[in-house]
Amino acid sequence: MLLNKFIKPSLFVQLCRRNIQSKAQKRPPLAFAFDIDGVIMRGPEPLPKARNALRILDGNNSLNAKIPYILLTNGGGQTEFDRAKKLSSRLDTQISPSQIIQAHTVLKDYVDAYADKTVLCLGGVGDTMRLVAESYGFHKAYTTTDVLAWNSSIWPFIHVTESDLASAKPIDFSRTPISAVFVFHDPRNWGIDVQIICDVLQSGGLLGGPWVEPRTQDVELVFCNPDLLWKSDFSRPRLGQGAFKASFQAVYSMLTGSEYPYTQFGKPTQSTYDYARRVLHDLLDRSYGPGSGTHPRMYMIGDNPESDIAGANAAGWSSVLVHTGVYDPTTGPPRHVPTHEAEDVEEAVVWAIEREREMVRQIEEEEN
Ligand code: G3P
Ligand code: MG
């Protein structure tokens, strides 16, 4: 056969086999994006129905199909690899790093522009944000701890410990301009980080340098998580990175007369939902072969109407609001109306699968 002339027999067999396989394993009609805090986890503990919900997607469902899913969180503070490992052990299931999208994961798209420029990565504990940034490809990433180790008088109210200094990366910030400030994760000490961001921006990137005219400031400022509130294991929702941003901008505009322009990522932003759609389509192409059939309907399962539901609705996805997190149904209808509300993540998953089964059944009925 002509084809054999150009392709080694083994490769030909592989291609045939792949073609048969992808034809055999039809893409499921739906896929899921799960929020983490308030849907799957409550603080360090899995929520009661989380394990079973993921078991249902592993094939134990009325579609008899393995249903693909990603975890889409405004949280962060570690690499996707570490998060996947921890969640897999807490939830007794296998979750791969490629299924995890944290608030700062989208910054992988910024590496080309900033790989060899000095950037400040804020949030989290100690040097974790530098390690995450370096794992993405940022070669000159520094943290609040590095700034304090360089000159602790930048924030006179703190005593820098030996262990802080141990994890610090030496640099002379008075000679090394900072090109961008990325707020990767929720800052642990708002006072220090507000002070440092103001210092970087007002001096055009050269810490401790003279103030520059506001309009000349071209240090890029990026926030990764807009959440004002989020649900951990405390009885009431907690302040999130969005509250930190509001505090920073309040101080900065008192100092300079106006807020500093910034880029926002995280749910509900379109860039984060577009990133999530890309990741999920790659997952599907890897599982079922590229272009084999239409993309499944996307279901976002979330606890926060402002981030999970607003973003999913704007992305044209179906959305399910659960009652195990930020949203409290006794406070009235949510500002952003979901496709459906459910008590918990398991009820949400079962509802979505039954909805799709019903749709498939109706289509088949019409075709017959
Ligand atoms: O810091 C995390 C928090 O803002 C929300 O996380 O998983 O509910 O999007 P998540
Ligand atoms: Mg949540």
Image (tube, rainbow, N blue to C red):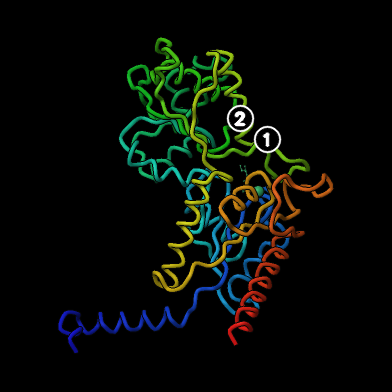
SS under mark 2? helix
Q: Amino acid at mark 1?
A: Leu
Q: Which mark is residue 244?
A: 2
- Percent position (x, y) of residue 184? 50, 38
Is residue 75 at least partly visible in the picture?
no
Lower position in the chain sequence, tag 1 or tag 2: 1
- Percent position (x, y) of residue 27? 50, 74
User: Which residue is tagged 1?
Assistant: 239
Rendered view: 189 above or below 92: above
- Between residues 85 and 190, which one lies in front from this camera angle? 190
Q: Residue furthest top?
A: 210
Is residue 86 at least partly visible in the picture?
yes
- Percent position (x, y) of residue 38? 69, 51
SS under mark 1? strand
The N terminus lies in quadrant? bottom left
Q: Which mark is residue 349?
A: none
Q: Is 341 on the left or on the right of 294, as rendered?
A: right
Q: Quadrant of residue 46?
A: bottom right
Tag 1: Cα neighbours inside 10 Å, few (<14), some, or many (≥20)? some
Question: CA separation, marks 1 and 2?
Answer: 8 Å
Q: Quadrant of residue 354?
A: bottom right
- Between residues 90 and 330, which one lies in front from this camera angle? 330
Asked whether the residues under the numbered discs 1 and 2 touch, taking CB atoms below 8 Å apart as contact, a structural biologist would say yes
Rendered view: 143 above or below 10: above
